[in-house]
Amino acid sequence: MSEPLAGIRVLDLGQYIAGPSACQTLADLGADVLKVESLRGEQARSIGMFGDSMLQAYNRDKRSIALDLRQEKAREILHRLLAESDVLVQNFRTGSAERLGIGPDELTRRYPRLVHGSVTGFGADGPSSSRPGLDIAAQAEFGLMHVTGEADGDPQRLGLPVADVTAANALATGILAALYRRSTTGRGAHVQTSLLEATLAMQASNWGEYTLTGEAPKRKGNGQAHAAPAADVVNLIDGQIVLSAYTDDKWSALCRLIGREDMIADPRFVDNPARVAHRAELMSTLSEAFGTMTRDQAVDALVSAGIVCGAIRSLHGLAEDKDVMASGVLVDVRGQSGSAFTSPGLAFTVDGRRRTESTAAPETGQHTSDVLSELGYTETEVDQLLADHIVGTSTADRYARKVSR
């Protein structure tokens, strides 16, 4: 079976996470993704380990070409690439693409079959369109930090770049829809999203609560404000679990499991509103009942009773977890120097399949010579472009060129 996007070429002009992550999805689906970087490389390359982790997470199986797009000859190369490409993705600040001559109107005019994907921080049309939009700003301004953390503590960011990744997933979905439409109409599209839109969209249930009650949800730490026990944390001998048993049938099953059938008819716990009002007493009882168990014992008992629960774990050891291994979500990545590591791949399969092996993120300009050769440039012309600093190359590319001669 061929990969779903085999034969599709994508130009990735993205920086950091939102753009590159969308392109990573396309690469995992089989697209040929060319990472178009400045001669110094994309910005994530300059911020140490934090940036290195981004590069490896969101740039697997891509090729890199380095262009100084401030120069006309480099822009000519970009347009030669565009003429042979299906998708372009960028997460520039509003107006930057237009200054480079690759704004949506220009792209639609010159390349009517091209699908152009863009992601901004605050949207392209509002008064904040020119603001730089990083994940943390979106988490702060659009409601996430307000509901994250303890009730009497400071607002907290989520422990991952959730706004960036959600925007990337939205962009990839839009691009796939546009490619499908193009298959029947022959017409490309401009797919737009923003961290603003993605952050609000992921909070549909909170937004529903707000519109129904007129009150914005508040942070309260663990547990859900209107259900109990729901997403509540219980301490054990060797760690913690989280459990939910807020429907009457699950609450009754939980009471029978811990030998407290008397709590089923207790006025403090007789229904969900009562349990919410007396959460402290409820949690005290659960802590006492489970406090002598290990995580494995508690999870086994709760699962046997049909109650939703989960052991609270770090990433450490998850690669060896039997369910993670059975899912196949982790791919084996070959590093540039022969090293190997794993990385999460696609979160879905197509006909039960997805890539199981991958190559690490490329060096800046690692494939410059190969890509220029594919475009019809001669070795002499490539040498001159390199000498004039129109394009850049990596150590590996320079070595390959030397060996080929």
Image (cartoon, grey):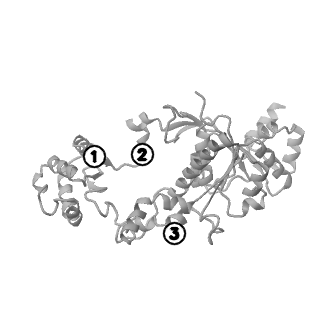
- Where residue 194 sits: x, y (%)? 58, 60
Farthest residue, direction front: 185
Q: Quadrant of the C terminus?
A: top right
Amino acid type, mark 1:
Arg
The quarter of the displayed image where residue 277 is located: bottom left
Mark 3, secondary structure of its residue = helix
Nearest the eye: 89 or 357: 89
Q: Which residue is mark 1?
A: 295
Nearest the eye: 113 or 35: 113
Amino acid type, mark 2:
His
Tell me: residue 85, above or below residue 141.
Answer: above
Q: Quadrant of the N terminus?
A: top right
Disc with the residue nearer the chain's start (2 vs 1): 1
Residue 65 visible in this rendered orientation of the protein: yes
Q: Characterize the local packing of mark 3: few (<14), some (14-19) or many (20 or more) Cα atoms within 10 angstroms.
A: few
- Real-space CA distance between mark 2 and mark 1, rounded to the nearest whole angstrom: 16 Å
Farthest residue, direction top: 1
Tell me: residue 132, above or below residue 67.
Answer: below
Q: Characterize the local packing of mark 1: few (<14), some (14-19) or many (20 or more) Cα atoms within 10 angstroms.
A: many
- Where residue 236 sits: x, y (%)? 25, 51
Task: State yes or no: discs 2 and 1 in contact (Cβ < 8 Å).
Answer: no
What residue is at 11 percent from the left and 57 percent from the top?
265
> Which numbered dot is residue 316?
2
- Where residue 395 sits: x, y (%)? 74, 42
Q: Is residue 15 left or right of residue 310?
A: right
> Which numbered dot is residue 141?
3
Tell me: residue 388, above or below residue 279.
Answer: above
Disc with the residue nearer the chain's start (1 vs 3): 3
Nearest the eye: 18 or 190: 190
Image depth: mark 1 or mark 3 in front: 3
